[in-house]
Image: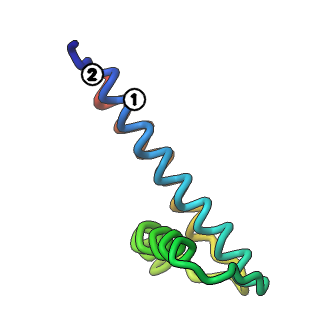
Amino acid sequence: MAVTRADVANYVDWVFYVYILIIFIYVLVNLLLSTGVRPPYSRFTDAVLTFLRDTAEPYLRLFRRFIPPLGMFDLSPMVGIIVLYFLRYIVHIAIAG
C-alpha cells in the first residue's frame, strides 16, 4: 500500500484541525471557569484541563505578546485559529502540489 502526497496532506490537515479543536475547547473551558463553574475534582478532569492548558497556551502566548487583551476580551485565540487555518492551507498546497 503506497502512501501518496495527497494522503500525507490529508493527515497534516487533520493534525491542524485537531489542534484548532484543542484551542477552541480550551477557550470554552476557560470561559466556563471564569464564570465560576468549577468541575468536581478528579484526576481525569485535572488531567484534561492540564493537557488543554499545556497544549494551547504556548501557541496562544505567541499572539498575546503582540495583541493585548481588550478589557476582558482576549483576541489571541481568534487570531491564532485564523493563522492556523492559513498555515493549514499553505502546507496542504505545498505537500499535495
The crowd level at tag 1 (other Cα within 10 Å; few <14, some 14-19, many 20+) is some
Task: Work out whether residue 33 or residue 43 is closer to the camera in this orientation and state it.
Answer: 43
The relative height of residue 13 versus residue 18 in the rendered view (above or below) is: above
Task: Work out whether residue 44 or residue 20 is closer to the camera in this orientation and state it.
Answer: 44
The quarter of the picture where residue 29 lies is bottom right
The relative height of residue 25 versus residue 84 in the rendered view (above or below) is: below
Number of labels in the image equals 2
Give me the residue at 53% from left, 71% from top: 44
Let me know if residue 60 appears in the view. no
The quarter of the picture where residue 71 lies is bottom right
Residue under label 2, please give it: 5
Give me the residue at 76% from left, 81% from top: 37
Amino acid type, residue under disc 1 in the picture = Asn
Amino acid type, residue under disc 2 in the picture = Arg
**Residue 19 circle label:** none
The relative height of residue 53 versus residue 1 in the rendered view (above or below) is: below
Give residue 11's position: percent from left, percent from top: 36, 33
The crowd level at tag 2 (other Cα within 10 Å; few <14, some 14-19, many 20+) is some
Give me the residue at 77% from left, 86% from top: 36
Q: Residue furthest front?
A: 42
Give me the residue at 39% from left, 29% from top: 10
Give residue 61's position: percent from left, percent from top: 44, 76
- The answer to whether mark 1 and mark 2 are in CB contact below 8 A is no
Residue under label 1, please give it: 10
Give residue 5's position: percent from left, percent from top: 27, 22
The local secondary structure at tag 2 comes to helix
